[in-house]
Image (cartoon, grey):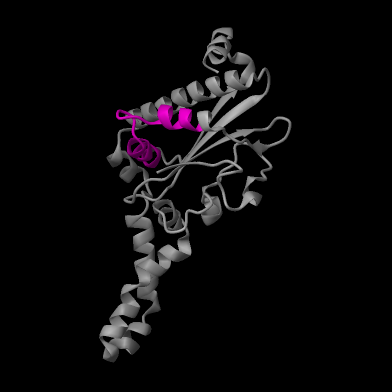
């Protein structure tokens, strides 16, 4: 599930005020949702990023058991340590890959690094076209690709365009730039799922792709003008 984070695609614009680049955003939860997304798939997927809601879901069997078996309600309620253990096991064993051995079982390190290289190469391709279209001649552009650290659930990928010039900020993307990211970042060979496994295997969930606008070739700028 790909979500392009810009000032116009979030419900809480205060999140867009950043002090450094690259800035991780995924921890801001529901404020990152696009307007009018209540009830949609992205709403429920972002809800799983809120730890309190995950804890409540893990503990759901206990109140259900108390309702079904009232005579056992008191004994069940007297074992909070067991409830904490259930939450811990769900978080550490089911929803995360918490050690190097488990990460290596997901994907060999060389293959994972190759996946990260693919994302980096495609990110630079995207940034080059954006810089050329905008006629940027100086400053660094950052394509920040973030993925959730939660395993065994459908991945969510947040992509934002950030810059530190003239001050740290998250830039708006027009329709053509958004489509460029959707068409370029993932395809049938390098899917979002594959990148998520790559991120889990590396234990690296923020991928910062940087481009110096001065490095954009004259050919890329002419091509951008021709397709404008």
**Which residue is at 46% across, 41% downward?**
205
Q: Main secondary structure of the magenta part?
A: helix
Q: Is residue 164 above or below residue 154?
A: above
- With 171 as the anchor, is 118 left or right in this view? left
Q: Is residue 118 above or below residue 224?
A: below
* Magenta residue check for 193: yes
Q: Position of residue 83 (x, y in %)?
A: 37, 73
- For the C terminus, the quadrant is top right
* Magenta residue check for 194: yes
- With 164 as the anchor, is 2 left or right in this view? left
**Which residue is at 31% across, 78% downward?**
64
Q: Is residue 48 above or below residue 57?
A: above
- For the N terminus, the quadrant is top left
Q: Position of residue 167 (x, y in %)?
A: 72, 35
Q: Is residue 46 above or below residue 76?
A: above
Q: Position of residue 216 (x, y in %)?
A: 58, 14
Quadrant assignment, res 196: top left
Q: Identify the magenta region.
A: 178-201
Q: Nearer the viewer, residue 174 or 144?
A: 174
**Which residue is at 52% across, 56% downward?**
30
- Number of numbered discs overlaid on the protein picture: 0
**Which residue is at 35% across, 74% downward?**
82
- With 47 as the anchor, is 190 left or right in this view? left
Q: Position of residue 73 (x, y in %)?
A: 32, 87
In the picture as drawn, the residue positioned furthest to the bottom comes out as: 71
Quadrant assignment, res 218: top right
Work out whether residue 181 can be spotted: yes
Quadrant assignment, res 116: top left
Work out whether residue 85 can be spotted: no
């Amino acid at each position: 599930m790909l979500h392009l984070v810009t000032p116009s695609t979030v419900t809480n614009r205060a999140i867009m005020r950043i002090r450094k680049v690259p800035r991780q955003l995924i921890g801001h939860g529901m404020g990152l949702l696009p307007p009018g997304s209540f009830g949609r798939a992205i709403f429920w997927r972002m809800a799983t990023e809120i730890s309190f809601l995950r804890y409540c879901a893990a503990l759901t069997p206990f109140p259900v058991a108390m309702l079904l078996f009232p005579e056992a309600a008191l004994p069940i309620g007297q074992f909070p340590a067991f409830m904490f253990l259930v939450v811990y096991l769900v978080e550490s064993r089911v929803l995360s890959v918490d050690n190097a051995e488990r990460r290596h079982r997901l994907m060999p390190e060389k293959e994972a690094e190759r996946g990260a290289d693919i994302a980096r190469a495609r990110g630079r391709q995207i940034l080059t076209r954006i810089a050329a279209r905008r006629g940027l001649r100086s400053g660094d552009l950052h394509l920040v690709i973030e993925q959730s650290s939660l395993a065994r659930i459908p991945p969510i990928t947040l992509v934002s365009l950030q810059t530190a010039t003239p001050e740290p900020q998250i830039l708006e993307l027009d329709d053509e730039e958004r489509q460029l990211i959707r068409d370029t970042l993932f395809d049938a060979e390098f899917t979002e799922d594959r990148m998520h496994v790559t991120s889990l295997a590396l234990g690296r969930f923020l991928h910062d792709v940087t481009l110096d606008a001065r490095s954009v070739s004259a050919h890329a700028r002419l091509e951008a003008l021709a397709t404008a």
